[in-house]
Amino acid sequence: MGMMEMDTTPAMSMDSYTSLVSLEGCMVFSPIYNVVFRATPGGDDIGRVKYGTVKESMARTPNWFMVENDGVYGWISALGHSRGQLRLIFR
């Protein structure tokens, strides 16, 4: 990972889909770091969500937010939020 990238959750922090909660009006963004974008919670790295990009989160688990990035649905770590590296906006 480069200096401006964030992945705060090791792959072992996979959440169960039974803990999935639908969200409405929740936007997430990272003001500083590119965020690792994963296929499933704690799963394969499939890209990056560029810092400063606001994404709507459709659902979350205790440790992950589901977002759409360039036409692909995937997951970003929610742990960055507790460390001040990820911001939430509610409409």
Image (cartoon, rainbow, N blue to C red):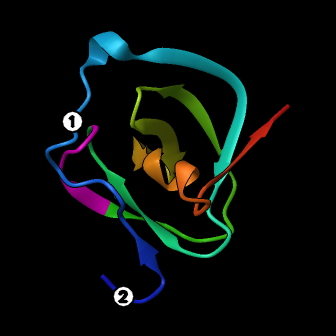
Residue occupying the far top of the picture: 18
Q: Quadrant of residue 47?
A: bottom left
- Say if the magenta span includes residue 42: yes
Q: Position of residue 38 (x, y in %)?
A: 30, 50
Report helix, strand or loop for mark 2. loop
Please state the extent of the stretch shown in magenta in the rendering. 41-46
Image spot of residue 84 (x, y percent): 62, 60
Total numbered labels placed on residues in the image: 2
- Give above or below for 60 relative to 13: above
Q: Quadrant of the C terminus?
A: top right
Residue labelled with disc 2: 2
Which residue in the structure is indicated by mark 1?
14
Image-based side of 11 in relation to 40, left or right: left
**Quadrant housing the N terminus:** bottom left
Q: Return the residue found at the far bottom.
A: 3
Instruction: Report how far apart the C-alphas of labels 2 and 1 lie in the structure.
Output: 23 Å
